[in-house]
Image (cartoon, rainbow, N blue to C red):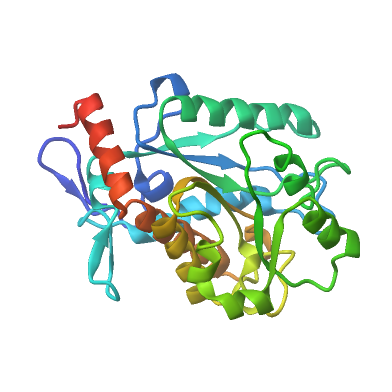
Amino acid sequence: MAAKQGGSKTRINRPFVGIPSFLRAPICLDPDDFDGAIAVMGVPFDEGSPFLAGSRLGPRALREHSLRFVSGAGGFYNPETRKQYLDVELTQNLIVDAGDADVAPTNVERTFANVTEMARSLLDRGALLVALGAPFIHDLRFTNGHAFRHIAPMAHVESLTQVGIRSLRHSPAMVEDSIRDGNRVVTMEEFRRVSPRGIAEMVPQGASCYVSIDVDVLDLSLIPGCVSAEPNGMSYAELRDTLKALAEHTNVIGFDFVEVNPELDVRTGVTSYLGAHTVIEFLGHICDQPRWAARREKHMAKSGTR
């Protein structure tokens, strides 16, 4: 966004200028000093990838492409809805880039501990957490196919829904074990039958909902910078409408976006751009809800912004 610096001088701040924090938000690397309402953190880790590495560079690429969405007007304008989004969040510095979790090469347990400690510190400060990163892949306990197995036993988790399942590379156990554990597995055929709104309504209205977005939910043709892309995926409009419906129907308490691999992307960086686009538009819809407006006002009153 355009910003004043050195008195009355106004900077243009084109996307190729300056330090690439997410949406050119202020940076705070010490969670104890964090005073934002929305915390963006990166998890640049992809060790032990079963095919091609490189998604550790995803958080940095998403930050760089996010600079294309900021302007002197503050937030972003959607011509379809004719509304401005994230205007207050950006002009009042409510979005803060908290940097990246510290990665310990070859030591997945220590990296996990660092990610958990950083996330917990930011959540303890009352922030809505937005994580940019890569799936954790190391041994048979920490592959990108094991996330739901680790999440399901947690006491506060009431239900898990996986949407967009379609790969012919799944083993029967990958799908059947998840269903047997009580998870809802929605194939692309079912997704198109029930619609984005129907997906959101699988979660009780107003329920706390954490959303994990893997870029490979999108169709292979849209995401050259993803090692695990598959045909017959969602269009961008289908993903956008699903996320918008979730923002409206549930209380989104945080979300992550994973598996962009800039090393595989085309030179224009379309996968990284699409990833940044998805994160920013989803965040805009979350912050457009009355429940967020009330939370935002409470935060601003407490911090003395107003």
Q: Name the residue at 50% across, 54% down.
A: 204
Where residue 190 appears, as percent x and y from the top left, is 66, 76
Instruction: Tell me if I can see residue 83 in this picture.
Output: yes
Instruction: Tell me if I can see residue 93 in this picture.
Output: no
Report which quarter residue 100 is drawn in.
Answer: top right
Counting labels gives 0
Where residue 235 appears, as percent x and y from the top left, is 55, 77
Q: Name the residue at 36% across, 46% down.
A: 24
Left or right: 60 as drawn, with respect to 148: left
Report which quarter residue 222 is drawn in.
Answer: bottom right
Q: Nearer the viewer, residue 148 or 156?
A: 156
Left or right: 56 as drawn, with respect to 125: right
Where residue 128 appears, as percent x and y from the top left, is 43, 39
Q: Nearer the viewer, residue 99 or 202?
A: 202
**Extreme-top residue of the structure:** 32
Q: Nearer the viewer, residue 100 or 257?
A: 257
**Extreme-front residue of the structure:** 204
Where residue 216 appears, as percent x and y from the top left, is 66, 65
Q: Nearer the viewer, residue 19 or 116?
A: 116
